[in-house]
Image (cartoon, helix red, strand yellow):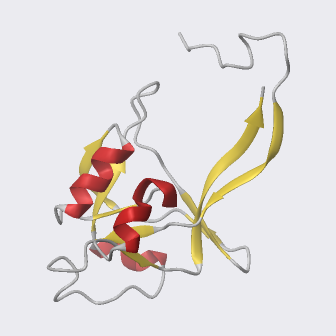
Amino acid sequence: MTQPSVAASTSRPARSRGPSRRPTLSLLPPPGYLQGRQMTTGPADLAAFDGIVLRVLSTGRVRRWTMRDGAGNTVSPPLQHSVIVNDPAAMRDAALHGLGGLLTAVPDVLPALSDGSLVRLLPDWCGDAGSITVH
């Protein structure tokens, strides 16, 4: 049995307010993890990296991202599922410990990006997180 959505549990309809594009693709700790690895030139190169992925609690499935570039090309990144967690903070912490790369929203990792603990790969690509809805 599926859980009712927030929209189904209220008398107000959900209204989409457009796509939520999260411009972070893959974040990796620069010391150690990237040493001896070729830098990525496109999403297909992410297959060579260990992936830290998010399991969605409500479905039990691993969150799949679609990446899009400025020209509108889309691809599902081929990240290996080396570490599976159920919390964005745990994803960030695993990356900070050098366990691999992750796809997540910039606000979840902004301090680590700012201080250089994580680096952004493929800046011309962004993850599409779906619609933003207002209830």
- Which image quadrant for residue 68? bottom right
- Which image quadrant for residue 57? top left
> Which residue is painted at 58% across and 68% down in the image?
126
Rendered location of residue 44, percent (x, y):
44, 76
Is residue 90 depicted above or below 23 in this figure?
above
> Which residue is painted at 46% across and 65% down in the image?
77
Is residue 32 depicted above or below 25 in this figure?
below
> Which residue is painted at 70% across and 79% down in the image?
70
Question: Is residue 105 visible to us here?
Answer: no
Rendered location of residue 5, percent (x, y):
65, 19
The residue closer to the viewer here, 22 or 48, is: 22
Rendered location of residue 28, percent (x, y):
30, 71
Is residue 43 depicted above or below 12 in this figure?
below
Q: In this view, does 74 lie to the left or right of 42?
A: right
Question: Is residue 108 visible to us here?
Answer: yes
> Which residue is painted at 82% across and 44% down in the image?
17
**Quadrant of the image containing the C terminus:** top right
**Badge count:** 0
